[in-house]
Image (cartoon, helix red, strand yellow):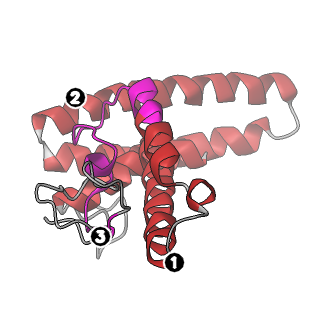
Amino acid sequence: MTCWHCWAGGVTAAQAVCAVCGAVQPPQAIDHFALLGQPRSFDLDLPALEQAYVTGQQAVHPDRLVGRSARERAYAASHSANLNDAWKTLRDPLNRALYLCQLLGIDLSSSDGRFADAPQLLQENMELQEALMEAAGDVAATATLHHQVAGLVQQQLHQLGDDFAAGDATAIRLGTLRLQFLMKL
C-alpha cells in the first residue's frame, strides 16, 4: 500500500502510521490478531497482547493528534476504535474462542438446538443447573460449586487450546459451547 500523504510505498495493512512521514493511514480490513501483531491462536501471550494494544493506542489515540488534519484525526479515531475492539475481544478467552470460530467458519448454532448433537453437554448443563438451584441460599454449597465450576473452566480453557492447535473443528465447536455455558453459570 502507498501512503496517502507522501506516496511512500511499503505501508502494510497493520500499520496505522507511515514510517516515512508519520501521517496516520486509513484503516484497512484486518483481523484482530494481525491488528495487534499476534499469532492467530487461542493460546496468547497476554502481556504481549496488552503491550501491543498500548503501543498501538499511543500511536493513534485521537487525543495525541489534536494538531493534525481532520482527515488524520478521523483515521486515528477509527484505528483507536478498532484497537479497542480487538483488545476487548482477544483478552477474554470466551470472546477469543467465539472470534476464532467465526474466522474459521465454525458454526456454533444448530438447527436442532445447541446441545442436540452433544448429549454429554446437555447432561452436564442440567446437572450443574440443578446443583446451582440446590445450593441457593447456602453460602458454603455455593462456594463449593463456584470452585468446582472454576476448575471446569480452567480445564476447558486448556482443552480448547489443544483443540484449536489441532484444528479439530468438532472439538472446537463443542468445547466453545461448553466454555460458553460454564462462563455463564
As measured in the structure, the alpha-carbon distance from the residue carrying label 3 to the one carrying label 1 is 46 Å
Provide the secondary structure element on which disc 2 rests: helix
Task: Please report the residue visible at 28 percent of the width from the left and 55 percent of the height from the top.
Answer: 18
Quick check: can you spot residue 92? Answer: no
Residue at image point 75% right, 39% down: 134
Q: Which residue is mark 2?
A: 162
Crowd around label 1: few <14 · some 14–19 · many ≥20 (10 Å)? few
User: Where residue 82 sits in the image (x, y, percent)?
Assistant: 43, 61
The reply to whether the magenta stretch includes residue 34 is yes
Q: Earlier in the sequence, mark 3 or mark 1?
A: 1
**Does residue 167 lie above or below 11 as drawn?**
above
Q: Is residue 37 magenta?
A: yes
Q: Main secondary structure of the magenta part?
A: loop
- Image position, residue 160 (x, y; %): 30, 35
- Tell me, yes or no, if residue 57 can be seen here: yes
Q: Which residues are magenta?
A: 25-51
Query: Residue 16's image quarter?
Result: bottom left
Q: Which residue is mark 3?
A: 110
Query: SS at mark 1?
Result: helix
- Marks 1/2 in contact by CB < 8 Å: the verdict is no
What's the amino acid at mark 3?
Ser
Q: Which residue lies under the disc numbered 1?
A: 70
**Is residue 35 or residue 6 the one in the foreground?**
6
Q: CA distance from mark 1 to mark 2?
A: 46 Å
Q: Residue at x 67, y 29 (%)?
A: 146
Give left or right: position of 185 versus 91.
right
Which sits in the foreground, 9 or 61? 9
149 displayed left or right of 9: right
